[in-house]
Image (spheres, rainbow, N blue to C red):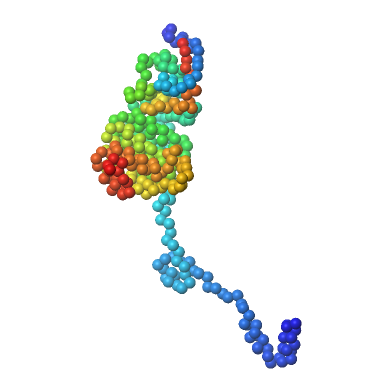
Amino acid sequence: MVAEKETLSLNKCPDKMPKRTKLLAQQPLPVHQPHSLVSEGFTVKAMMKNSVVRGPPTAGAFKERPTKPTAFRKFYERGDFPVALEHDSKGNKIAWKVEIEKLDYHHYLPLFFDGLCEMTFPYEFFARQGIHDMLEHGGNKILSVIPQLIIPMKNALNLRNRQVICVTLKVLQHLVVSAEMVGEALVPYYRQILPILNMFKNMNVNSGDGIDYSQQKRENVGDLIQETLAVLERYGGEDAFINIKYMVPTYESCLLN
Amino acid sequence: MASCDVKPKSVSHAKKWSEEIENLYRFQQAGYRDEAEYKQVKQVSMVDRWPETGYVKKLQRRDNTYYYYNKQRECDDKDVHKVKIYAY
């Protein structure tokens, strides 16, 4: 009814046309909102009124690094290692084609350590098991090879892959107890090994009163690091603690206090 | 050569872990019945053992490759029943 009245009145007085247009204009139109502009911090754009400054990008300290082809893989594929894989009921085992005692430790042990960077079967298995056997039966031959083992260990830790870190830490623990004086011989190299341990030291799960199954499987990085540092301190002689503390400031002694 | 013909008369499975069973487990992993057979086949008089624990340390298998064993116990409780005890 109202519309009809309006049309009637308009027809009667055509001079009121502009008034009508004015009325229509007063109706609510969709308002054009200036959408916010996302910009990097400390740029000219960031000074604009409608800009929203984006937070800084992640530094990626814990991000896994890409793996490079290892010398271990090359040597293994070429058949240079005197090892063979044996499957048995308990799992896999290495059969050595020569006696470990007769192996050149200066050549083979660094190569096996280089294989710590590997994550795939069979390379990872051979590296891990080969190191285990060589350390277990190396005796006094191990001490003189220590300087050559640091770089491969550092490379493996620097990959920041949880699985690789776990294996490397267990190997490091075994290395320290494998022979006399090895713990002391490692002290000058803490600078190479410990920075990554410092980074990942707090990588632990706060599960409240829940069960963290990785603890039992010894795959919890935080716990493993704590354990490894304690072993290093125990076997590293009197200078060990202060050197560990220098690289890992949150480490507390397991011997003092 | 008479010793080569020694054949076991009976066999039974181990029930409980002991140091003896641990060593048998190691010999059987390498493919021998026990120490006697190993010595026969390889013509050796001594077996490499860990000085601390007395467990077998190194065995040469039939294909002349070597198996190395840990200083500590390797035979878990779940594997004990797999160990065979031969009687002569």
The residue positioned farthest toward the front in the image shown: A209
Q: In the picture shown, does residue B66 fall above or below A40?
A: above
Residue A241 seen by the camera: yes
Name the side, left or right, on which A257 lies relative to B6: left
Which quadrant is the N terminus of chain B positioned in? Answer: top left
The residue positioned farthest toward the top in the image shown: B2
Name the side, left or right, on which B4 lies relative to A235: right
Q: How many marks overall?
A: 0
Residue A162 in percent (x, y) is at 43, 44
Tell which of B55 and A58 is nearer to you: B55
Image quarter for residue A233?
A: top left
Residue located 43% across and 32% down the image: A79
Residue located 38% across and 30% down the image: A133
Residue A93 in percent (x, y) is at 45, 29
Residue A214 in percent (x, y) is at 45, 41
The residue positioned farthest toward the left in the image shown: A238
Residue located 33% across and 25% down the image: B52
Residue A164 seen by the camera: no
Image quarter for residue A194?
A: top left
Residue located 64% across and 84% down the image: A23
Name the side, left or right, on which A69 lies relative to A185: right
Residue A227 in percent (x, y) is at 36, 40
Q: In the picture shown, does residue A49 fall above or below A117?
A: below
